[in-house]
Each structure stands twice: as C-alpha cells, then as structure tokens.
Amino acid sequence: MPNKIFLVVKREYLARVKKRSFIVATILTPLIFPSILGVFLWIGMSDTGGDSARFIEVVDENQEFFLESNELFVFSYGIMTVAEAKEMVQKGNRYGFLHIPKLNLAQPIGITFYAAETPGMSVVSGLESEIKAKIEEIKLLNSGIDRELLDKLKTEVSVLSIRLGQTGNEAVSNTVINYAIGFISGILIYTFIFVYGNQIMQGVIEEKSSRIVEILVSSLKPFQLMMGKIIGIGAVGLTQFLIWIVLISVVSSVIMGFFGMKMPQQELMEQANPEGMGWMSEGSDLPDMIQLIQGIDFVSLVISFLIYFVGGYLLYGAFFAAIGAAVDSPSDAQQFMFPVTIPLLIGYMGLFIFVLDDPNSKVSYWLSIVPFTSPVAMMGRVSFGVPLSQLVLSISLLVVGFLFTTWSAGKIYKIGILVHGTRVNYKTLWRWIKEN
C-alpha cells in the first residue's frame, strides 16, 4: 500500500513541477516582493530632498506656542496675518499653516490647520500631539513650576520584557518581534492551505471529468489515490515555498546592496566581528540585539511551524479532495466550499483580532486548541511562548482531526470519484460517509 501511494505522490509531484506554469510562477513570484521593495526604496530616497520637508507656518495669537521642529515638521514663525499665511500655502511656499487663536487653556478650541491638500492621519495626529504637549507645559508653568525643574521632570522610560520559563529560566522578549513572527507564520500557513487545497480540488475534478480516474482506480484503491494526490501536491508546495525563500533573500540582498543598504543579518554579523572593536562601544545596540535573538526559541518555532504547516494542510487537503470527488465542475463545488473555508477564515481573522493582540486570552487559547483553527492561530501564540501542555494538547487534537477528516473524506472520495451526472447535496455526502 505505501508503495502505491508513493507512486501517486511521484506522479503528482513530477507532473506539476515540470509544468511551465510552475516554473514561471516559482521564478517570477519571488521577484515581485523585492521589486516592490526596490520601488519603495527608490521613492523614499528620491524624496530625501528639501521638497519632502513639511514646512508649516504658525500664526500664534497667544505668543506662547513655540513648537520645536522635528523629523516630521519644520515650524516657521513670522509676523503675518491669516490671509497672508493662506497665500503662502496657496503659492506652494509652505506645506500648510497652523492658526492658533486666543485660547482658553481649560478648553482649547478653534485651532485650525490649513493645507493645499488633505493631510494624512499621521500629520493631524502629530500636530495634535505637539500642541497637547505644549498646552500641558504652559499649564505647569502657569501653576508656578520653574522651567528648569520642568525640564528635569521630563523622563524617557524603556521597559525591558522578560519571559519566565516554567523551569525558572529567563529570556528577553520583544513584543514587536513576536508579533511579526506570529503574523508572518500564520499568514504563510493560511495561504498555503488555501492555495494548494484548491489545487487538490481542481486536480481531482479534472481527472474525474476526463475519466482518467476510472483507469487509476482499477489498479489502486481510491484512498491510496486520494492520499497520494494530497501528499504529492503538498510536496510541490513545499518545494516552491523553499525556492521562494532562497530567491527572495538573494534578490532582496542584491536590491538593498544596489541602494547601499544591508540586510539586518549582514549588519549584525559585521557588528559582531571582533576585528572592528567598535562593536562593544558605549551606546551600541548589539548587546540588546543579541539578547533578543537569544530570547527567541528558534528550535520550537521551526518544529511548531513544520507540524502545523503539514498538519493543517493534511487536515484541510482531505476535505478539498473529497469536495473535488463529489462534484463534476468547479461551479458545483462552491456550495461545499463554504463550511470548509469558514473555520479557516475564523482562524485567520482570530489571528489579528485576538491572538496577536492578547495571545493568552481565553479566545486565543481555544482558537489554538480547536484543530480547524489551530494551524493558523497557534503560530500566532508560539512566538510569545506557549506552555508545553497546551502545545501537546493542540498537536494531539490536530492529529485526531486529521485522522477524522481523512476517514470522512476517504468515504466520500471512494464513492464520489466514480459518480457522474448526479446532483450531490449534504444529505448525499452524509449517506456516503455512513456507508461501509
């Protein structure tokens, strides 16, 4: 039996990797993301001239709001009327102008920003933040606090996050990095399941329509054919995925090198080179970076990713194969796709709404335990650290879920693959599952 499944896997794998469409997609797709990166870098470097600075004229009727220029805004002060400031904006001499009328600091209303174009949210929120801080400073000064003392009271705080393990070990963690890892891995699994699951369904429908499957089932069991197709297409996806990683890394390095930039790992290695003793200089971020890297459990991440990557694909792949066997055309498959894709979408949406926001909440826990949502949701939690008991429970249920879906799909596939011209509904599928 394993030998026959291997033959189907080999057939599916070789037939697909030799297709021109596979070769084109495998080569062109990795060029898209580095190309987009290159365009953004080019645009960003082109905008580094003086025209990119947002010069804002300030008309302050209070004579108290001196706003300090920063990386976002360059504030200009002059003795002029509102009409004159408006004219400067209309002529393009200023990005905009800020009108601050006589204010009641208890209720500061009437502040207006004029610009030739509708400003983005970052511009408006940045101005609001600057004015708010200035009003608070003026209130403190009016209450009798000395300016020198006020400057001393301003303090920047940075909180170091430490994750305590069950064995008492400590590891430095960074929420942003954990979020990024969970985000990327969850999206990859979701995309892989959806794209290659559809390929399984399309492949089964094509073989069923062309009657090739009737020849195949004469020499092997329908279950062997289904498993071989699922594993073979999954192997194609893994091959394409690994090639993409290599090509995207190489092409991104070339593009960033063209703009005089380096990949983060290159910069880290160069800083860690003992020949350049500046790596241990005061103020260097390298020790913090090393601590963050050491705080990431790469072994658990890779192992968990592979388990949920493969487990999720096999779980849903069986359903996609069963749907393909039950229908005669892709249009007929739509009615059965809905209940299959809903759990996958719940896991995808739950990743953003619950898991990445609070990986330890009850909703995040159940999303990562239920087999139909765990492949996507659990990867959002793993980077933050998950108790071993929860991880074992989630993987065990995923295996049980895979066995159940494979058993159910095998029942449907065994009968449906040879049925033509019959209108299939949910009642029919249930009858097929109950048949021996």
Image: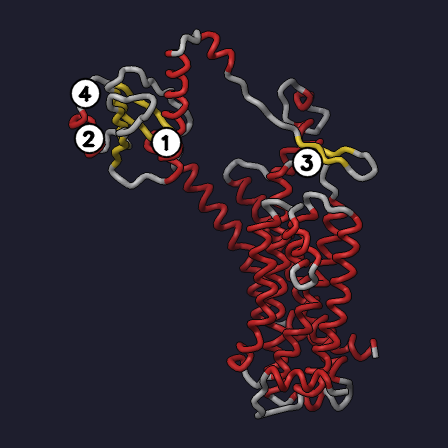
**Label 1 SS:** loop
Q: Are the residues at dot 3 and dot 4 in contact (C-beta closer than 8 Å)?
A: no
**Spatial CA span between label 1 and label 2:** 24 Å
Earlier-in-chain disc, 1 versus 2? 1
Q: Which mark is residue 173?
A: 3
The amino acid type, in three-letter code, at marker 2 is Lys
**Spatial CA span between label 2 and label 3:** 49 Å
Q: Eyeballing the image, is 77 above or below 41?
A: above
Q: Quadrant of the C terminus?
A: bottom right
Work out whether residue 173 or residue 139 is closer to the camera in this orientation and state it: 139
Q: Quadrant of the N terminus?
A: bottom right
**Spatial CA span between label 1 and label 4:** 27 Å
**Label 4 SS:** loop
Task: From the top left corner, tell me how far across and down residue 380 is, in percent.
Answer: 64, 50
**Label 2 SS:** helix
Q: Locate residue 367: give its quadrant.
A: bottom right
Is residue 218 visible in the rendered image? The answer is yes
The amino acid type, in three-letter code, at marker 1 is Gly
How many neighbours does mark 3 have within 10 angstroms: few (below 14), some (14-19), or many (20 or more)? Answer: many
Q: Are the residues at dot 2 and dot 4 in contact (C-beta closer than 8 Å)?
A: no
Name the residue beneath numbered marker 1.
49
Work out whether residue 429 or residue 267 is closer to the camera in this orientation and state it: 429
Q: Which mark is residue 80?
A: 4
x 78%, y 75%: residue: 6
